[in-house]
C-alpha cells in the first residue's frame, strides 16, 4: 500500500476467542490510583496465543 | 452485519473493487477516529484496534466515508465511490489517486482493519454480566491493603484526607493482614497471579506488618499454586536501606510519590507542621531507584497550580528517574486546586510537548524515560475481555481497611454505602457487588460513541460516582484528558516503531 501504513496491532476481534484468561494485572495496582487506564496494561497470556 | 456480496476484478485496469453491503445497524457500530499530530495523519479503527498512518488523500477519503450520509448506504459501491471521487476532486486530488486510496481503504475494510463493527463485543458484555454474584462464583484476584489509615504527611489534595479516609487513625494488625491473604486465596479460584498493593495513608508507618504479610503469603503461595505480586505505594519519608532491600527482593512494583520541582512538591506534600518533604524524600528516592532492579514508578500529581506539569516530569528525569507517572488531581470542582475547563488547552499542549520531548530523547539517546500513560503496547495489549470489563473494582479487585472491611476499591473506602463485608465473613452486600459486576463498558451509555472506549474501558468507577453519582456515568473532564493522552501515546508509539524499523534496516 502506498497511501496507508498499517501499524502492527493486536487484533481485538481475534482476542474475543483467544483472550479472557483473567491473569492480567488489575489496572489500579500500578501507578495511577486515580484514573483508570487499561490500554497500557500488558497482556499476561499474549505469548501463549 | 457486514456481508461481502461481490468481489469483481476489472480485468482491463487490474484494479479490485470491493462492493460491501452494510446495514444501517452495522454502520452505527463502526467507529473511526482521525487526528493529526506531529505533522502526521492518524486513523484509528476503534473496534479492531487498528492503527493506520495515512497520507492526506487517504485521510480525507476516510473522513468523507465516515462523515458522509453514506452511513446508511453501502460503502464503496459504485455510487459511493463516485460520490467520494466527486467530493475529493474538489480538493484538487486527481481521480486516479482518489481511486487508488479508495482501493486501499476497501482492502483494509475487507481485512477487518477499517470500519469494523462491534457486534461480538455486545454479546460478550451481555454474557459476562448476565448472572448475579450469588449465582456465579465471584473470582477476586487483587486486594489493596490499607495497612495504615494514618500518614506522616498532610497533603491538602489527598483523597484519603490525611490518610484516615474520614475515619480514625488506625493500623492494620498482623491478624487482619493474614486473614486478607487467606480471603484472597480462597476467592481467587483458578487464578494463579494474585496482586496485593500496600497502601494507605502511608504504609511504611506499619512496616513490620507489611513484612509479616509478605512473608505469610510467600510461605503459603506454593501450596495453593499461587504467585503473589506485591506493590508498595509510599511518600518516601520512612524509606531506609532495609526498606529498599526488602522491596527489591519482594515487591513487583513500587510507586514513589514525588510531584516534581521542589516548590511544586512542597506546596502540597508537607508534614502536619507544614514543612515541605522534598529535601527528605528525594535523596531516598534517588537511592531507591538506583538500586531498583524491577519495576518502579515515580508518581506525581499536578493541580491547577502547575498546569506546566511537563517541567515537573522533566525535573524528575533530571534527577535520574526514568519510569514516570503524573496524574491530574481529582478533587471537588470548587477547590482552588481543581483543574478547570479553562486549563484544558494548556494541558493538551503539555501532553504534546511531553510526547515530542520523549520522542526526541528516544532519537538522541539522551536521558530517555517512560511515561506511564504513554506505555501503550499496541501489539501485546489487553484482550477485548479486559477492555470491556475495565479495572475490575468491586468484582475482582477490592480494598481492605485496617480493620478488615471490604470496599470496591481504595477510592470508595470510608463510604458506608459501599461497604461490602469483611475478610472474616466475606462479601455480604450483594446489591453493590451486583452493580459493579454488571458495570462494563457497554453499561455506560455515554461511552457508546466515544472513540477512546477500548483504551480506558469506561474509566474509573469512583471518579464517575464522585462526578455524577453513578458508577455507570463518566467523569467528563478526566475523559478529555485521557483521550488527549491516548492520541499522544499512540503517536509516540507509532513513531518509535517506525524509528526501530528504520534502525533495523540500517543494520
Image: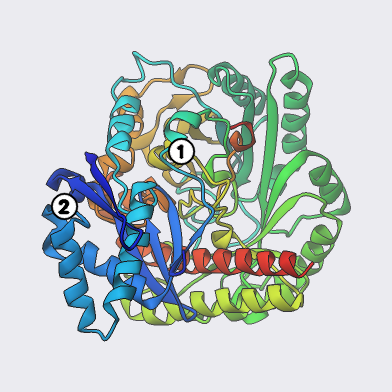
Mark yes or no: residue B332 visible: no
Q: Position of residue B485 (x, y in %)?
A: 47, 66
The residue shown at (47%, 81%) is B39
- Read off the chain for label 1: B
Q: Chain of mark 2?
A: B
In the foreground, B490 or B7: B7
Residue identified by numbered label 1? B386
Q: Give the image quarter of residue B272.
A: bottom right
Q: Is residue B381 above or below residue B349?
A: above
Gap in angstroms between the C-alphas marked 2 and 1: 32 Å
The image's mark for residue B74 is 2
Identify the secondary structure beneath mark 2.
loop
Residue B85 x/y as whole percent: 21, 72
In terms of depth relative to the viewer, which is nearer, A12 or B156?
Answer: A12
Q: Quadrant of the N terminus of chain B?
A: top left
Q: In this picture, is B280 found above or below A15? A: below
Q: Is residue B412 left or right of residue B17?
A: right
At 38% from the left edge and 81% from the top edge, which residue is drawn?
Answer: B345
Q: Are marks 2 and 1 in contact (CB under 8 Å)?
A: no
Task: Tell me the quarter of the image containing the C terminus of chain B.
Answer: bottom right
User: Callout 1: 10 Å neighbours few (<14), some, many (20+)?
Assistant: many
Q: Residue at x 15, y 44 (%)?
A: B25
Amino acid at each position: 500500500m502506498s497511501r496507508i501504513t498499517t501499524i502492527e496491532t493486536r487484533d481485538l476481534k481475534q482476542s474475543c476467542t483467544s483472550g479472557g484468561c483473567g491473569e492480567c494485572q488489575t489496572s489500579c495496582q500500578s501507578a495511577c490510583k486515580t484514573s483508570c487506564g487499561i490500554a497500557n496494561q500488558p497482556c499476561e497470556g499474549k505469548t501463549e496465543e | 452485519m457486514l456481508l461481502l456480496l461481490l468481489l469483481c476484478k476489472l480485468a482491463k485496469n487490474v484494479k479490485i473493487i470491493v462492493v460491501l453491503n452494510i446495514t444501517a445497524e452495522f454502520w452505527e457500530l463502526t467507529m473511526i477516529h482521525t487526528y493529526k499530530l506531529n505533522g502526521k495523519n492518524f486513523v484509528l479503527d476503534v473496534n479492531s484496534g487498528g492503527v493506520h498512518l495515512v497520507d492526506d488523500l487517504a485521510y480525507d477519503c476516510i473522513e468523507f466515508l465516515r462523515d458522509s450520509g453514506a452511513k446508511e448506504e453501502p460503502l464503496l459501491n459504485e455510487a459511493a465511490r463516485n460520490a467520494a471521487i466527486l467530493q475529493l476532486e474538489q480538493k484538487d486530488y486527481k481521480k486516479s489517486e482518489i481511486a487508488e486510496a479508495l482501493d486501499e481503504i476497501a482492502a483494509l475494510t475487507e481485512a477487518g482493519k477499517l470500519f469494523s463493527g462491534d457486534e461480538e463485543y455486545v454479546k460478550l458484555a451481555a454474557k459476562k454480566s448476565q448472572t448475579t454474584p450469588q449465582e456465579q462464583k465471584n473470582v477476586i484476584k487483587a486486594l489493596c491493603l490499607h495497612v495504615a489509615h494514618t500518614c506522616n504527611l498532610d497533603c491538602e489534595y489527598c483523597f484519603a484526607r490525611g490518610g484516615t479516609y474520614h475515619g480514625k487513625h488506625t493500623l492494620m494488625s498482623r491478624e487482619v493482614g493474614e486473614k486478607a491473604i487467606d480471603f484472597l486465596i480462597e476467592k481467587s479460584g483458578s487464578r494463579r497471579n494474585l496482586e496485593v498493593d500496600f497502601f494507605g495513608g502511608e504504609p511504611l508507618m506499619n512496616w513490620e506488618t507489611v513484612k509479616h504479610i509478605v512473608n505469610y503469603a510467600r510461605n503459603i503461595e506454593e501450596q495453593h499454586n499461587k504467585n503473589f505480586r506485591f506493590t508498595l505505594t509510599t511518600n518516601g519519608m520512612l524509606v531506609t536501606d532495609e526498606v529498599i532491600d526488602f522491596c527489591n527482593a519482594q515487591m513487583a512494583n513500587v510507586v514513589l510519590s514525588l510531584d516534581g520541582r521542589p516548590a511544586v512538591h512542597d506546596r502540597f506534600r508537607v508534614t502536619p507542621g507544614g514543612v515541605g518533604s522534598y529535601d527528605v524524600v528525594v535523596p531516598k528516592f534517588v537511592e531507591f531507584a538506583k538500586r531498583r532492579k524491577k519495576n518502579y514508578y515515580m508518581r506525581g500529581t499536578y493541580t491547577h497550580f502547575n498546569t506546566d506539569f511537563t517541567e515537573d516530569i522533566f525535573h524528575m528525569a533530571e534527577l535520574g528517574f526514568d519510569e514516570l507517572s503524573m496524574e491530574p488531581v481529582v478533587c471537588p470542582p470548587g477547590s482552588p486546586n481543581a483543574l478547570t475547563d479553562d486549563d484544558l488547552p494548556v494541558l493538551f499542549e503539555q501532553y504534546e510537548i511531553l510526547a515530542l520531548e520523549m520522542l526526541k530523547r528516544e532519537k538522541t539517546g539522551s536521558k530517555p524515560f517512560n511515561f506511564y500513560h504513554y506505555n501503550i503496547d499496541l501489539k501485546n495489549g489487553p484482550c477485548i475481555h479486559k477492555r470491556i470489563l475495565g479495572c475490575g473494582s468491586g468484582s475482582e479487585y477490592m480494598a481492605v481497611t485496617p480493620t478488615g472491611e471490604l470496599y470496591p476499591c481504595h477510592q470508595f473506602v470510608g463510604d458506608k454505602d459501599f461497604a461490602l463485608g469483611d475478610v472474616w465473613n466475606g462479601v455480604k452486600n450483594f446489591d453493590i457487588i451486583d452493580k459493579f459486576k454488571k458495570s462494563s463498558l457497554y453499561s455506560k451509555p455515554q461511552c457508546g460513541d466515544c472513540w477512546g472506549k477500548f483504551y480506558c474501558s469506561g474509566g474509573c468507577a469512583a471518579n464517575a460516582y464522585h462526578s455524577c453519582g453513578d458508577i455507570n456515568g463518566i467523569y467528563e473532564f478526566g475523559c478529555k484528558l485521557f483521550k488527549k493522552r491516548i492520541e499522544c501515546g499512540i503517536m509516540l508509539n507509532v513513531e518509535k516503531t517506525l524509528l526501530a524499523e528504520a534502525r533495523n534496516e540500517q543494520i
